[in-house]
Amino acid sequence: MDRKNVTSVTEFILLGLPLSYQLQILLFVVLSVCYVITLVGNATIIIVSLTDPQLHTPMYFFLSNLALLDISFTSSIIPKVVYNLISGKFLLLAMMSFDRYMAICHPLRYGTIMKPMLCLKLILCAWIGGFLDTIVQTVLTFRLPFCGSNVIDHYFCDVAPLLKLACGETYLIGMLDLILASSLVLGSLFFSMVSYGCILVAITKITSVAGRKKTFSTCASHLTVVFIVYGSCIFMCINPNKNSKIDSTKIVALLNSILTPLLNPFIYSFRNKTFKEALKRTIKKKSYFLNQK
């Protein structure tokens, strides 16, 4: 290709979801409400966990980071989707599963093992690992020449649809993307499944029926989030329906980007008695300070 006669692409247009105007308005309303609830719910977890001393535990330290990650992830995608409609988050789950494994399977050693420094190291590993995985793909992708169409058949700027528009050789970057994504997803999934497997074995050894039921209920809700997150990512990698009018991977990605951040506060925190009591104390403190003014 003669590069002298080719105009380089400097911006991209997101195609979004090919829906009728009525469905776009409906989806705009639904996503807007879900986005607000996601922001309020996750921000509440962060504020209450930081301000209430009784929540200064490894579990809520991880939950605060998950809430921050959900806010960042959702805010990087949903506002643009909402704008387009109206105008025309793995290693951390693996760390949390390990925390629940220690709390349930080794309760007497939990306090001595899950010290603040270990929690900090685990969180740093999760954030740094995710950042490195993303930054490597991003840098390599945007070093490619883009000289054809600038229309991305997606609702956010993902690596895979960008590679389809590149003029240069993309095989190695595509393989690197697949290897990094597979290692990250399958590695953390394996770690999570081993942790929850040990938890389920420990649950069967609980003599109290009420205690066994309560612990199993908590783990079942946690596993729901795990299956949604990992299942959607594996589905998007397989991409079995590329030629449909509405790519099914778009729908799955949309559910993953709004559903899990929306559900996480309710599954991990708002159903928890300790957190609800802490939330009440925080509201009372806030009301007291406001009345003093």
Image (cartoon, rainbow, N blue to C red):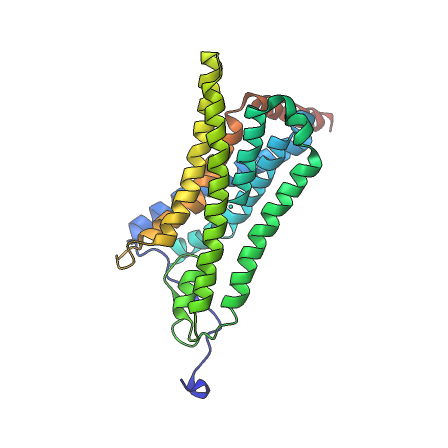
Q: Please tell me which residue lies in front, 160 or 247.
A: 160
Query: Could you tell me which residue is drawn at 48 percent across and 12 percent down?
Result: 207
- Decide: is 171 above or below 56: below
Q: Position of residue 68 (x, y in %)?
A: 58, 43
Q: Can residue 266 be seen in this view?
A: no
Residue reaching furthest right?
Answer: 292
Q: Where is residue 117 in the image (x, y as percent from the top left)?
A: 70, 38
Q: Position of residue 181 (x, y in %)?
A: 47, 54
Q: Is residue 153 visible?
A: yes
User: In what quadrant of the picture does the N terminus appear?
Assistant: bottom left
Q: Please tell me which residue lies in front, 101 or 155.
A: 101
Q: Count the marks: how many? A: 0
Q: Please tell me which residue lies in front, 120 or 205.
A: 205
Query: Could you tell me which residue is drawn at 49 percent across and 23 percent down?
Result: 202
- Decide: is 274 above or below 173: above
User: In what quadrant of the picture does the C terminus appear?
Assistant: top right
Query: Could you tell me which residue is drawn at 30 percent across and 49 percent down?
Result: 22
* Image position of 291 (left or right of 185): right
* Image position of 286 (left or right of 163): right
Query: Could you tell me which residue is drawn at 31 percent across and 57 percent down?
Result: 18
Q: Position of residue 215 (x, y in %)?
A: 48, 21
Quadrant position of residue 32: top left
Quadrant position of residue 164: bottom left
* Image position of 269 (left or right of 253): right
